[in-house]
Amino acid sequence: MHIIHITSELAPIAKVGGLADVVFGMARESQKKGDLVEVFLPKYDSIDPSFLQQLKLEYRDLWSYDGTQQHHNSVWSIQIHELKVLLLEAHHPAHFFDRGAIYSCQDDIDRFIYFSRAVLEYLFKSGKKIDILHIHDWPTSLVALLYKKMYRALGFFVKGVVLTIHNLQYQGKCNPHHLTRAGIYGREFLTPEELQDPLIPTDINLLKGGMEYADAITTVSLTYEQEIKAPGGGHGLEASLLRHQHKLRGILNGIDFDYWNPQTDPFLFKRYSLKDAFQGKSFNKKQFLKKLQLLPSKGPLICSISRLDPQKGLNLITYTLKYTLENEGQFILIGSTHDPNIQTAFEELQKEFSKNKNIFIHLKYDEQLAHQTYAASDIIVVPSLSEPCGLTQMIALRYGAIPVVRSTGGLSDTIFDLDTSCKPIDKRNGFCFNSPNVPEMDSVLNRAISCYRECPERWTQMIRSGMSTDLSWSRSSDAYHEIYCRL
């Protein structure tokens, strides 16, 4: 089966959040199981040049449209861990992908609409025999409509289009003239049955368009599927989701067990397995604290590795930092944001604790530091207001760090409370709370730290449970393969 993923992010070369990791893991697992898989994304100028050393030209003179104007493009390919990645280089006067950033440009709508059209133009002209187009979130949702309304009529055929919704909060709302620039008359689609936004009737909603025109819709956990169909949970798209629930399915994300593997991880101070997890984590913790020039403490090392976005429960992260200090623990925060107000607030926090030998705040994602943090930490906090799936809690389990999470989305599907879960005791792997407020956060942190200090056998059992849980892509990719085969 020939599968083309069309995406705005791909780990490790173009990463903002979990989308990048999910597409990479999903595509790589499909390829391992025998499918022919290619991933298409823009050739951002922010891609590390070391990944582009073996760049190969696939299509030199690709012409595509922006409104009535034709613009020249080139398509390149590289291999990332044996996965073929196609890169669209747009020679457009607006320099769409030469901005030093993936998102947060004022013309993001135009940038990704142009990308969607140009990718289809290439696939049509290349003569590739493709079974499945797999598109991701609003940036590439227009592919479904353009394929059905434009390219199929030109003689380009695929077996089906799959849309995966990674985060429904972001929907790609725009003016009808943006669609017109893609070569279709925008106002024709400004109806409730088509792409009209249910909350702003003058706007087009690109994600809604993907839902309308895709042959199958998936989202990234079973609980999130139910949450987004509930009143108020779909950010205005509940009616569309219910109308298309026959083609909607929640499939829990996985993580790449080859990449996130404490037995082989090249970033760790010492590699370890389930058999020697206690010794391995102790050694990594000692070296990690030395690296960061932090002092050993009596309490646990607690971490947060997260995008700094309001959705992530930022007030509860800062509360945890102060609670940890009060309980003789240490706190590590690795986070990044595109919001200048949030950046300023956390820079002030960083300055406030700059001389404290129990706190380390790093306001930029660092891959090596993240791996070392997972291996060294005793606890990871994920107090999200909303979390479609979440990968950090899965990675933490793999490395023997115990998650403290709010029960929402994929966090509910992966973390089972030591004290309250109905799961067998050997399947309980963390601590959960329901309401995202300080009293509940206080209570759950108290339970977690008390267990760490007073119940070493139960703590060790949770580490064993987490490290032995199969949250790899193998199971999840089987569910996607079923959808591909059905289409």
Image: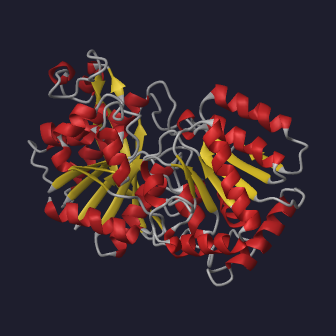
Q: Residue at x 22, y 68 (%)?
A: 1
* Residue 331, image x, y percentages: 76, 51
Q: Quadrant of residue 458?
A: bottom right
Horizontal relation, residue 299 to residue 47: left or right: right
**Residue reaching furthest bottom?**
275
Q: Residue at x 87, y 63 (%)?
A: 290
Query: Looking at the image, how many numbered discs can be counted on the residues?
Result: 0
Q: Out of 485 and 148, give the one closest to the viewer.
A: 485
Vertical arrangement, residue 57 with respect to residue 170, above or below: below
**Residue reaching furthest top?**
202
Q: Can the viewer see residue 119? A: yes
Q: Residue at x 64, y 55 (%)?
A: 380
* Residue 36, image x, y percentages: 29, 68
* Residue 336, image x, y percentages: 64, 41
* Residue 455, image x, y percentages: 71, 69
Q: Residue at x 11, y 45 (%)?
A: 152
Q: Quadrant of residue 448?
A: bottom right
Q: Out of 439 and 179, give the one closest to the viewer.
A: 439
Q: Out of 56 and 198, give the one closest to the viewer.
A: 198
Which quadrant holds the C terminus?
Answer: bottom left
Vertical arrangement, residue 333 with respect to residue 473, above or below: above
Vertical arrangement, residue 342 with respect to residue 22, above or below: above
Q: Can the viewer see residue 10? A: no
The way the protein has been coloured in the rendering is secondary structure
Q: Out of 196 and 444, give the one closest to the viewer.
A: 444
Horizontal relation, residue 308 to residue 128: left or right: right
